[in-house]
Amino acid sequence: MLTVKNLHKSYKVGKTKYEVLKGVSLEVNKGEFIAVMGSSGSGKTTLLNCISCYIPSDDGSILLGDIELAKLDEKSLSKIRNEKLGFVFQDFLLLDGLTVRENILLPAIIGGKINNQIEIRAEQLCDIFGIKSIQNKYPADISGGEKQRTAVARAIINNPLLILADEPTGNLDSKSSRAVISSFEQAKKSLGATILMVTHDSFAASFCDKVIVLKDGTVWRTLEKGTMNRLDFQDHLLSAISDMGKE
């Protein structure tokens, strides 16, 4: 599904060069829910931005299926982002002048794919994510959790190969966070979605199949849930993060 090999990214400020990603490699298989964790400055969001090619990497490869993303021109990349990638952001990025339903349909509208089948899919997504009763409301009239569930539905409307989520629970209270993570779980279970989520939250990460921990721009450790229950996996994550701090 997604293969990242030996990814490097640095920034130059004045005459000083700062390496952010130092040879990151990872794989995301179809139907997996994977988290990327790490302290501030570890390269989590830079990694996500490089995968989506919103910022260029310095070296390495990013394969979505058999497509080498970094080699595409901007027009081809825009098509891939609209059709093959779904995005969920910390700040929701819903359009205030559109209803919940219209926000969900936005990627299909941009792609010129509005038809009866897409309309039915939007209705199904509203039902799956528990936002059917608010589909005609505007973002200003709904809660943060409802906004983020709307954003998840929007990310899925075009049936993308991969959903990229950047701190999707960062601005939410615990109840809303749980509702958003439930939306991801439901997307995986009911729709076969593949999700790569950047998070600092061990609670959110504990619902994932696998957690990739970054430290100083490298993959420090990969933790797999396996047969552990969620609470045991969360304890395992917290222990690993504590070990990383000691190192």
Image (cartoon, rainbow, N blue to C red):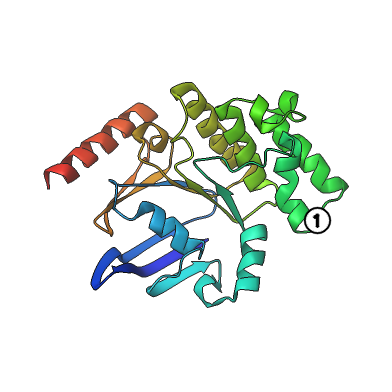
* Front one among 233 and 80: 80
Q: Position of residue 190 (x, y in %)?
A: 64, 38
Looking at the image, which residue sits at the far left?
A: 246
Note whether 208 is above or below 13 in the view shown. above
Residue carrying label 1: 113
> Given the image, on which type of amino acid does mark 1 rest?
Lys
Note whether 184 is above or below 36 in the view shown. above
Q: Residue at x 66, y 32 (%)?
A: 139
* Front one among 2 and 104: 104
Disc 1 crowd, CA 10 A, few/some/many (<14, 14-19, 20+)? some
Q: Specify whether 144 is left or right of 36.
A: right
Q: Residue at x 46, y 59 (%)?
A: 49
Looking at the image, which residue sits at the far right?
A: 116
Q: Specify whether 175 is left or right of 129.
A: left
Q: Position of residue 116 (x, y in %)?
A: 87, 46
* Front one among 118 and 232: 118
